[in-house]
Image (cartoon, rainbow, N blue to C red):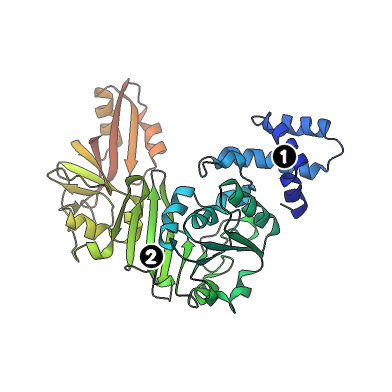
Amino acid sequence: MTIESALFLLSDFGKEVTETARDYESDTLLAGKVLRSNFSDIDPSFLSSAIELVQARIRGWKKFGNAEKMFFTNEALQQATDERVADHRAARFKGLNRVCDACCGIGGDAIALGKVAHNIDCVDNDPSRLLFCGENLRVNGIDNFNLIEENILNLKNRIDTYDALFIDPSRRPKGKRTRSLYEMIPPLSEVEDMLSLVAQGAVKLPPSVERDSLSLPHELEWVSTEDGLKEAVAWVGDFRRCDTSVTALHKNITLHDTDLPEEDPGTSAAENYLYEPDPALIRSGLLGRKAAQCGMKRICENIAYMTSGELVDDPFFGAYRVLDAMKFNLKNLARRLDSMNVGNLTIKKRGFPMLPEELQAKLHLRGDRSATIIATKELGKNTVFYVEPV
């Protein structure tokens, strides 16, 4: 979005146009027609920006409680951190005097940091996002901030004046999402150079990050919500508490590698219960050690389903009671489900050669009962478990 469009949206007249667009939020084509008719003397690009803002606010409520008052672009909203995740991360910055939020974007993290730090400098080289960042901070009651339009790499000669640094590199170079740490802006090498100059800092990374990608000593934290794996964060300097941690925000629990035994759970055939681990636990590499701590075993090497004879109640695992099991054969499975009058089937899978929707289509279910199956490998063989959630 251009700076001119951003300034228009922040103006009183721009807010009036946006309110008009909001009346037609369910039909963007009609919204455009009405705006062009009612505001024929306004630059069409400004009108399009108002429609974009309305649509972004609709999507933004999933991330921000005050989304209907905040300012976004589509791309900036996609990269912005969910406020619950941002609040969790900001807790380590609590009480610090001067914090730098580099690559602040529209202010998702700045809002959380502004609640806990005494002063925050919000730095970005995109003037439109920086304007929106300031307005979003004000909307959320934050006033202890400075807006700095600058390439964050230019901060190196004064970065040590901050108590802590947070960096959220852009992972959308040229508008396309990348998982590469070297295609981020700034790339990982530059990020680490900056983090090495402060006493403590953090960088938000894609969940695909590998531990050996970073050269600085760090703690790598994976964070999940009920919607799945959200992000990874590398903590350096005095923020570092361990080597690896896992946080399930929807369960309000954090696990550190130092809490776990150095044990492998081993492998066995499925017993009375199967367990589906939290995706952050899987990605962290701590699954085996956590399973061993809980007395579970794998049902197959490299497959993230665990099993036990007695029920284990642990927030990092979803439990299923095994009702029956069979080696996979499509015709036999279809007959079995038909005999049970199943029509609504939930399919969970790992390491299975068919996608759930592909298997569902080939089963031709016609019943009226509901059921859940887990399609996976047990000791290397394709197996289907008929289960019920505990």
Quickly name the residue at label 2: 220
The picture quadrant where one finds residue 150 is: bottom right
Quickly name the residue at label 1: 15
Label 2, secondary structure: give it.
strand
Q: Is residue 168 visible?
A: no
Q: Between 165 and 224, which is closer to the camera in this rendering?
A: 165
Q: Is residue 23 left or right of residue 380?
A: right
Query: What amino acid is labelled 1 in the image?
Result: Lys
The vertical placement of 365 against 280, above or below, is: above
Q: Earlier in the sequence, mark 1 or mark 2?
A: 1
Q: Is residue 61 left or right of residue 85?
A: right
Q: Is residue 257 left or right of residue 205?
A: left
Comparing labels 1 and 2, the label whose residue is closer to the camera: 1
Q: Label 1 vs label 2: CA separation?
A: 42 Å
Residue at image location 60% in from the left, 74% down from the top? 155
Q: Position of residue 17 (x, y in %)?
A: 75, 36
Query: What amino acid is labelled 2 in the image?
Result: Leu
Extreme-left residue of the structure = 309
Q: Between 271 and 329, which is closer to the camera in this rendering?
A: 271
Extreme-right residue of the structure = 41
Q: Position of residue 306 (x, y in %)?
A: 22, 50
Task: Say if mark 1 contacts mark 2, CB within 8 Å.
Answer: no
Residue at image location 29% in from the left, 33% down from the top? 372
The picture quadrant where one finds residue 26 is: top right
Q: Is residue 38 left or right of residue 203?
A: right
Residue at image location 33% in from the left, 67% down from the top? 241
The residue carrying pointer 2 sits among few (fewer than 14), some (14 to 19) or many (20 or more) residues within 10 Å by Cα, namely many
Quarter in which the C terminus is drawn: top left
Q: Position of residue 71 (x, y in %)?
A: 64, 46
Q: Between 263 and 341, which is closer to the camera in this rendering?
A: 263
